Image (cartoon, rainbow, N blue to C red):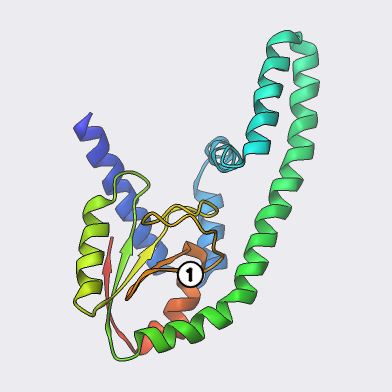
Amino acid sequence: MLDKRMEECRAESIANEKLTANKHFSIYLYRIFTNAPLYLQWKRLLSYVRKFRTVAFILRVIGILITILETGALVILTTAIFLVLLPILTALMLGILIAAQMDARGANRSMKKALDGKRVYLFFLPRGNASFLCAWAKELAKEGTAAVLISPYWISPRGLGGKKFYFTIRTEEKNLYLIRRYYFFSLRKRVLKNEATVIVY
């Protein structure tokens, strides 16, 4: 079990390192979708969908219907759901990305002020237990160093206890910030180019 978790952490670190090798978010997105099987992408998409209570309820009802319906009807129903749900989810993600793009300019201005003259630590948070990295980031923030946590979640507001939804950036504490992965590229290009930056995968 421990070996499996270590292997997952290693794979996640390698993926995060690859993310920093991309200059633009669009290239990063393209590589994600071309390097992973469609089935895994669909499973990942469903895991995001389950975050929303309404959609989770709908999926539960669909699950009950699936057990009742026969195989032929099941194929028709699954195809119909896929054709309806996929455009809705695509529109939702596009909406979030457009809002994030619009919000990025203001976020860059505030981050330039906040990070001016400071050493910056960038932490790529894993999906699992991130308590060690979060504790390290908090200590650095207390000492006056800027700590930027890069969330592994595209939609979830999960962070250091904060519940407020954010498109690009959320201030967790003084000198401690939580950002989205898609905002990382703008931050690096517009704000961090002249700063002393340490990246922790």
Tell me where residue 45 appears, x and y as whole percent: 58, 42
Q: Report which quarter residue 136 is drawn in.
A: bottom left
Tell me where residue 43 appears, x and y as whole percent: 55, 36
Q: Which residue is mark 1?
A: 169
The residue under the point 67% across, 68% down is: 98
Q: Is residue 7 visible?
A: yes
Q: Is residue 197 left or right of residue 163?
A: left
* Disc 1 element: strand
Q: Is residue 178 left or right of residue 52?
A: left
The residue under the point 38% across, 61% down is: 18
Q: Report which quarter residue 128 is drawn in.
A: top left
Q: Residues within 10 Å of mark 1 (few under 14, many from 20)?
A: many
Tell me where residue 94 appears, x and y as whole percent: 68, 59
**Tag 1: amino acid:** Ile
Q: Is residue 23 visible?
A: no
The residue under the point 75% across, 47% down is: 88
Tell me where residue 20 appears, x and y as whole percent: 38, 67
The residue under the point 76% across, 20% down is: 75
User: Relative to residue 152, is residue 198 depicted above or below?
Assistant: below
